[in-house]
Amino acid sequence: MDALGTLHHIMGRGIERTKIFRKQIDREDFLARWADLCLQENLAV
């Protein structure tokens, strides 16, 4: 977390709506890491 108590908006797309993951396994890895971070920091998803 870079700034305690702030809200962040996460977008799941690239510039001009291009895909940000080339492979399904990369997407799944990102989501797993994000879920772990949310649990560690007690964040709502």
Image (tube, rainbow, N blue to C red):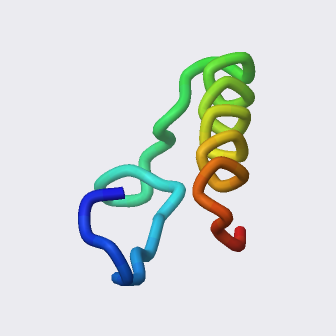
Task: Report the side of 22 relative to 38 (left or right).
Answer: left
Is the N terminus in the top left, top right, bottom left or bottom right quadrant? bottom left
Position of residue 2 relative to residue 27, above or below, is: below
Residue positioned 26% across, 59% down in the render: 2
Is the C terminus in the top left, top right, bottom left or bottom right quadrant? bottom right
Residue positioned 60% across, 45% down in the render: 37
Q: How many marks?
A: 0
Position of residue 27 relative to residue 9, above or below, is: above
Residue positioned 34% across, 82% down in the render: 6
Q: Position of residue 38 (x, y in %)?
A: 65, 55
Q: Nearer the viewer, residue 40 or 18?
A: 40
Q: Quadrant of residue 30?
A: top right
Q: Position of residue 20 (x, y in %)?
A: 47, 38
Q: Position of residue 11 (x, y in %)?
A: 47, 64
Residue positioned 69% across, 40% down in the render: 36
Position of residue 13 relative to residue 34, above or below, is: below
Q: Nearer the viewer, residue 30 or 2?
A: 2
Q: Quadrant of residue 15?
A: bottom left
Task: Report the side of 22 relative to 43 (left or right).
Answer: left
Q: Nearer the viewer, residue 14 or 16?
A: 14
